[in-house]
Image (cartoon, rainbow, N blue to C red):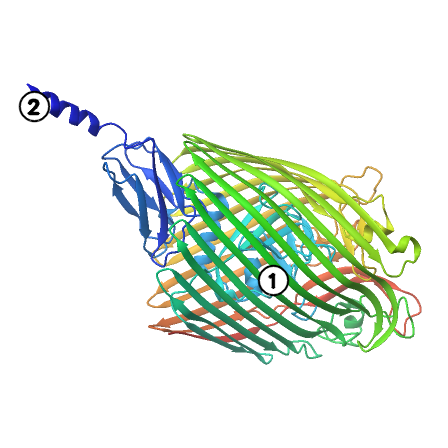
């Protein structure tokens, strides 16, 4: 009888939950922390996901429950729980891409980005942004200048409404930049060093502040590499590129690698572009203890180039210059950037995590442009020089807490931009100084804090968020003798946000997002117009669904609306930001990913946008250069008998170049092709841009200009021609 009682008690204890929770960390075989891994309890059908630290917490687990771990691009793993494994160290191995492994409960964009990056690895700086659904870019200054960005009906210029960062903390956007507000030059990144591209549409991520109105992009740099690799490219127009990633140290507690990139090209313009670019990268990781980790990166970038600039249609029509000609062949510039960032991770307990980030950037910039030719100065011409030097200092402290069904992330941070000798000058042929237009120093500080709560109730996930920013600008005008040229502005702004996701079943999820965002104005604009908005508010709403069809097909449908309090448009030749009043944009987005055969994948993204001014007194309400229709996609073959390749298309519809649609920026349809063959440690590939050799305009503006021989100015489309047929050969070696 006594034995029966003991046995009954033991059996009773066996069915008691292991604990309130099962915790763990998930990595790949190289030790990289894996985010957004789905963990599913096969007995209860409940699920959760790993966070950015690769950690997870699972509630209400019992002995003999089976947990399944799966992530796109990795082999799934099952673990049966017993009384001893309430903390799991899970290692996932890579596997061929299978879209049936898609977890519909994962964030929409993470699914799309994972698929796209697997199908078309990033090979150049242009592709780094083109991987974002619905985003188009244009280069109009010789290849060394930051790209012009179009997204959700915004002509973002060089970054005014898109927050861009590296490793979640290092800012790319430049406040009060000499050439454009939010200026974002990504050429300092080595494409081969990028592990992932994280895109969030709208202003729904509280960790992103200034410029995150249309969306945000974060480039994650690899912490370690599998093999040393060397890559060489050559192509038309005297193009050559050499890059490499070299393993320096690989150990149990520490690892490091170095990256290098050198690129040169004459370009396809009549006047040689003479682009030269050098990149260097050093990445280091050290595990001080199991609860304390440190990682750091150091990078250097330098570039110089010449440019043909934008040319008037009337000169091409008359046959006086070719499509690839120029009016002022002395345009161009040079830039350099030094970056350092360090991160300390502290696992204070199994449900508490502290992360401390710090960064520093030294930046030099010089750009020569001529937008209007001889409109202002009929003798010397209208060429201008925009230049600056700046140091950026920043730090952020993040605290994560995970308990039961909720997760809390909170942070405080500070960014300080010290901008010296920011000036706009009138020049001739780069070498002759004529006069100063603007000159000054700017100190801009942004202190912020945010909190994000994620709460799960079976099929419903909600995330209320709030962010507060304090921005202070101090500007010293060197050309103003009154008040010592010093003026200050400051403003505090609070941005609440909310996300709700509801899982209908294992194959369908609905979501709703709303939030307030903002972007800042240029300090120099506030000097000229003290009543202008220091910080401009955006109001965003998204409503959509993602559906998994027949296991290997993913459909994403989204509707959105963005109201801008004030449309800020940068006027480069005057060095100011103009206020164009409030605007409203709304649209539809459709994304489709499909695996039709084991090695064959289809993808397509289509977007429609309606963009108008909201000012009732404004007669002409079109938003210049706002994209109405756009689409991109292709067919991809992945590792078929060691061959991989794709045929891709890009379509951008006609757009209004002026508020009254009297001038049209013409659209285009392009097709690109690439194929590669991998044999052991050798990879050989060929890529072709614009395989049909279409005549298309990459950048277009409605500009008033006057040529030397003209008596009156003319307003018409000025453009930079797009790439003609362009073939490149690529050879990569793994060592």
Instruction: Please state which of residues 302 and 603 is positioned toward the viewer in this rendering.
Output: 302
| Residue 231 position within the rendered picture, expressed as x and y whole percent measured from the top left | 46, 74
In-image side of 378 versus 26 (left or right):
right
Instruction: Please state which of residues 439 and 704 is positioned toward the viewer in this rendering.
Output: 439
In-image side of 509 versus 539 (left or right):
left
| Residue 626 position within the rendered picture, expressed as x and y whole percent measured from the top left | 70, 50
Instruction: Please state which of residues 18 and 704 is positioned toward the viewer in this rendering.
Output: 18
Is residue 566 visible in this depiction of the protein?
no
Is residue 144 visible in this depiction of the protein?
yes
Looking at the rendered structure, the secondary structure element under dot 2 is helix
For the image shown, how many numbered marks are present on the structure? Answer: 2
Q: Extreme top residue here?
A: 1
Which residue is pictured at 64% across the width and 48% down the height? 414
> Which part of the image, by quadrant, shows the N terminus?
top left
In-image side of 40 versus 212 (left or right):
left
In-image side of 598 versus 426 (left or right):
left
Does residue 70 lie above or below 42 as drawn? Answer: below
Mark drawn on residue 364:
none
* Quarter of the figure with residue 271: bottom right
Does residue 301 lie above or below 103 as drawn? Answer: below
- Mark 2 surroundings within 10 Å by alpha-carbon count, few (fewer than 14), some (14 through 19), many (20 or more): few
Mark drawn on residue 3:
2
Spatial distance from mark 1 to mark 2, Cα to Cα? 72 Å
| Residue 400 position within the rendered picture, expressed as x and y whole percent measured from the top left | 48, 40
Q: Nearer the viewer, mark 1 or mark 2?
A: 2
Does residue 694 lie above or below 402 as drawn? Answer: below
> Which part of the image, by quadrant, shows the C terminus?
bottom left
- The residue identified by callout 1 is 186
Instruction: Please state which of residues 429 and 729 is positioned toward the viewer in this rendering.
Output: 429
């Amino acid at each position: 009888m006594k034995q029966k009682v003991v046995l009954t008690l033991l059996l009773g204890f066996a069915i008691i939950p292991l604990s309130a929770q099962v915790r763990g960390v998930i990595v790949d075989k190289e030790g990289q922390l894996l985010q957004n891994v789905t963990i599913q309890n096969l007995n209860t059908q409940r699920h959760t996901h790993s966070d950015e630290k690769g950690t997870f917490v699972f509630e209400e687990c019992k002995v003999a429950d089976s947990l399944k771990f799966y992530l796109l691009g990795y082999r799934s793993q099952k673990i049966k729980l017993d009384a001893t494994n309430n903390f799991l160290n899970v290692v996932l191995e890579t596997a061929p891409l299978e879209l049936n492994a898609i977890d519909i409960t994962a964030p929409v964009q993470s699914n799309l980005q994972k698929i796209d990056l697997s199908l078309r690895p990033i090979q150049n700086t242009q592709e780094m942004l083109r991987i974002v659904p619905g985003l188009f870019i244009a280069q109009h200054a010789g290849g060394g200048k930051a790209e012009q960005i179009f997204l959700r009906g915004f002509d973002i210029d060089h970054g005014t409404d898109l927050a861009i960062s590296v490793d979640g903390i290092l800012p790319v956007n430049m406040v009060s930049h000499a050439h454009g507000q939010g200026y974002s030059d990504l050429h300092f990144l080595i494409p081969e060093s990028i592990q992932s591209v994280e895109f969030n549409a709208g202003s729904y991520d509280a960790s992103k502040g200034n410029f995150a109105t249309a969306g945000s992009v974060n480039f994650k740099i690899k912490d370690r590499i599998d093999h040393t690799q060397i890559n060489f490219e050559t192509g038309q127009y005297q193009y050559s590129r050499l890059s490499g990633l070299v393993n320096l140290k690989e150990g149990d507690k520490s690892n490091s690698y170095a990256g290098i990139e050198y690129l040169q090209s004459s370009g396809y313009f009549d006047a040689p572009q003479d682009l030269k670019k050098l990149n260097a990268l050093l990445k280091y990781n050290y595990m001080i203890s199991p609860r304390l980790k440190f990682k750091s990166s150091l990078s250097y970038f330098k570039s110089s180039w010449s440019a043909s600039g934008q040319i008037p249609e009337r000169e091409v029509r008359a046959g006086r210059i070719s499509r690839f000609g120029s009016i002022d062949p002395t345009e161009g510039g040079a830039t350099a950037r030094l970056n350092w960032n360090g991160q300390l991770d502290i696992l204070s307990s199994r449900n508490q995590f502290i992360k401390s980030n710090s960064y520093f950037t030294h930046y030099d910039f010089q750009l020569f442009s001529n937008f209007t030719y001889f409109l202002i100065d009929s003798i010397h011409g209208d060429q201008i020089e925009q230049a600056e030097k700046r140091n950026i200092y920043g730090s952020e402290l993040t605290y994560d807490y995970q308990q039961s069904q909720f997760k809390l992330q909170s942070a405080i941070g500070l960014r300080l931009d010290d901008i010296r000798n920011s000036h706009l000058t009138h020049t001739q042929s780069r070498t002759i100084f004529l006069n100063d237009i603007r000159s000054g120093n700017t100190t801009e500080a942004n202190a912020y804090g945010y909190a994000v709560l994620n709460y799960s109730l079976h099929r419903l996930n909600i995330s209320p968020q709030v962010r507060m920013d304090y921005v202070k600008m101090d500007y010293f005008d060197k050309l103003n003798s009154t008040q010592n040229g010093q003026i200050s502005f400051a403003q505090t702004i609070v941005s609440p946000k909310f996300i709700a996701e509801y899982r209908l079943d294992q194959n369908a999820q609905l979501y709703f997002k709303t939030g307030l965002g903002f972007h800042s104005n240029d300090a120099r604009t506030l000097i000229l117009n003290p009543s202008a908005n220091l910080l401009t508010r955006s109001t965003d709403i998204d409503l959509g669904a993602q559906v998994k069809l027949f296991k290997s097909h993913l459909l994403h449908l989204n509707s959105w609306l963005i109201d801008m309090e004030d449309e800020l448009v940068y006027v480069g030749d005057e060095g100011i930001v103009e206020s164009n009043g409030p605007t409203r944009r709304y649209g539809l987005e459709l994304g489709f990913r499909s695996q039709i055969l084991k090695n064959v994948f289809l993808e397509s993204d289509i977007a429609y946008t309606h963009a108008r001014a909201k000012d009732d007194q404004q007669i002409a309400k079109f938003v210049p250069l706002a994209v109405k229709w756009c689409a991109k996609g292709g067919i991809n073959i992945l590792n078929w008998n060691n061959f991989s390749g794709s045929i891709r298309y890009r379509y951008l519809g006609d757009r209004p170049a002026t508020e009254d649609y009297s001038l049209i920026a013409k659209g285009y349809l392009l097709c690109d092709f690439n194929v590669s063959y991998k044999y052991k440690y050798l990879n050989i590939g060929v890529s072709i841009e614009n395989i049909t050799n279409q005549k298309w305009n990459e950048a277009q503006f409605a500009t008033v200009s006057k040529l030397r021989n003209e008596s009156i100015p003319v307003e018409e489309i000025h453009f930079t021609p797009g790439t003609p047929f362009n073939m490149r050969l690529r050879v990569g070696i793994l060592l």
